[in-house]
Amino acid sequence: MSAGAKSNPRMADIWVQAARAAAALNVLVLVALGIVWARNYRQFRSKHALGLLVFALLMLAENGLALYFLTIDPIMMMSGTKQMAQTTLRVLMTVAFVFLAWVTLD
């Protein structure tokens, strides 16, 4: 963890807020993707569409649980370098989901 984040609780709070926002955005994007992929599976009955739907449901469960931990249960929150790393990974996941949504909805 950087010296500034260690001594500045506000900096640590920014990382938690960013992780919370990324998890919430992930949930919204995954719900939209899940709806599209469920519709596609009902129409085409393809394993590919089913695989994408299961992927969306599993990622939705993971991001929903992360959002719970970041919002409701502060005891489970990390601090310092761990929080920065977790937030960075969650933001990268958001970028991946938004790109996947762009490809799917295009």
Image: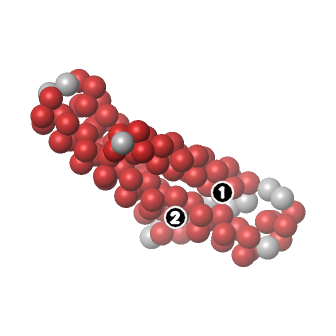
Please provide percent x and percent y for residue 43: 12, 34
Tell me which amino acid carries mark 2. Ala
Q: Which residue is mark 2?
A: 21
Dividing the picture into quarters, in which one does residue 48 lie? top left
Task: Identify the residue at image location x=74%, y=74%.
Answer: 9
Q: Which residue is mark 1?
A: 83
Q: Position of residue 54 (x, y in %)?
A: 29, 36
In depth, the one of 22 and 102 nearer the eye is 102
- Residue 86 visible? The answer is no
Q: Residue at x 31, y 52 (%)?
A: 32
Toward the viewer: 19 or 94? Answer: 94
Marks 1 and 2, how far apart at CA: 14 Å
Q: Residue at x 87, y 63 (%)?
A: 3
Q: Is residue 18 left or right of residue 102?
A: right
Q: Which residue, as the protein is rendered here, is positioned at the far right? A: 3
Q: Nearer the viewer, mark 1 or mark 2?
A: 2
Q: Secondary structure at mark 2?
A: helix
Q: 31 above or below 67?
A: above
Callout 1 secondary element? helix
Quadrant including the N terminus: bottom right
Q: Is residue 106 above or below residue 68?
A: above
Q: Residues within 10 Å of mark 2 (few under 14, many from 20)?
A: some
Q: Is residue 34 rendered to the left or right of residue 41?
A: right
Residue 50 image offset from top left, x and y in percent: 24, 31
User: Percent position (x, y) of residue 8?
Assistant: 79, 73
**Display colour scheme:** secondary structure
Specify the quadrant that holds the C terminus. Answer: top left
**Horizontal side, residue 83 vs residue 93: left or right:** right
Amino acid bearing label 1:
Gln
